[in-house]
Amino acid sequence: MTEQISSGSDQTTSPWSIVSLVGGIANFVGFPFWGAVIALIAGYLAKSEIEKSEGRIGGERLAKAGLILGWVGIGLGALTVCLGILMFMGIIGSAALCGPLGHLFNSIR
């Protein structure tokens, strides 16, 4: 029989990388802004922890996926805010020209 010698260098997964991935998924499921923020913070903490561990801690791909989901969520959130502002300005502008203030603006011309 052969004996297997354990070298003791079992690689564990960084808990921060798991938190990052869960935060990135939560961003699209029910926590739009906060999920992305958690994904980004935990993702960068995981990458730092993995680099400092010299190969003892893994999960770099999980952290990278969480970071990508986090940045996509931040981008979509910023786009939503910009479109909301444009929509709000359009509603205010149309109400000013066609609504109760329309008579005032038309009398100025």
Image (cartoon, rainbow, N blue to C red):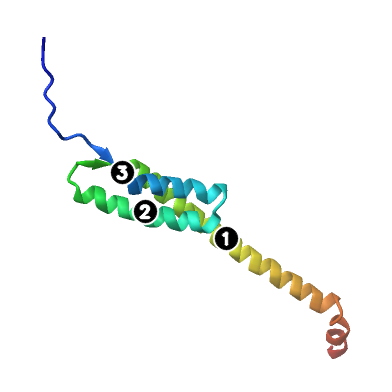
Is 57 left, or right, of 26 in this rendering? left
Residue 76 vs residue 43, the one in the foreground: 43
Q: Distance between the Cα atoms at labels 1 and 2?
A: 23 Å
- Residue 75: % across, % down: 51, 57
- Above or below, 47 relative to 101: above
Is 88 left, or right, of 13 in this rendering? right
Q: Of the residues shown, which amino acid type is indicated by label 2?
A: Ala
Q: Is tag 2's residue or tag 3's residue first in the polypeptide sequence?
A: 2
The residue lying at 16 percent from left, 35 percent from top is 9
- Residue 16: % across, % down: 34, 49
Frontmost of labels 1 and 2 is: 2
Is 61 left, or right, of 71 in this rendering? left
- C-beta proximity under 8 Å, tags 1 and 2: no
Q: Of the residues shown, which amino acid type is indicated by label 1?
A: Leu
Secondary structure of residue under mark 3: helix
**Quarter of the image containing the N terminus?**
top left
- Residue 15: % across, % down: 33, 46
* Residue placed under numbered mark 1 in the picture: 79
Q: Is tag 1's residue or tag 3's residue first in the polypeptide sequence?
A: 3
User: Which numbered marker is on residue 60?
Assistant: 3
Q: Distance between the Cα atoms at labels 1 and 3?
A: 29 Å
Q: Of the residues shown, which amino acid type is indicated by label 3?
A: Glu
Q: Is tag 1's residue or tag 2's residue first in the polypeptide sequence?
A: 2
Secondary structure of residue under mark 1: helix
Secondary structure of residue under mark 2: helix
* Residue placed under numbered mark 2 in the picture: 42
The residue lying at 51 percent from left, 48 percent from top is 26
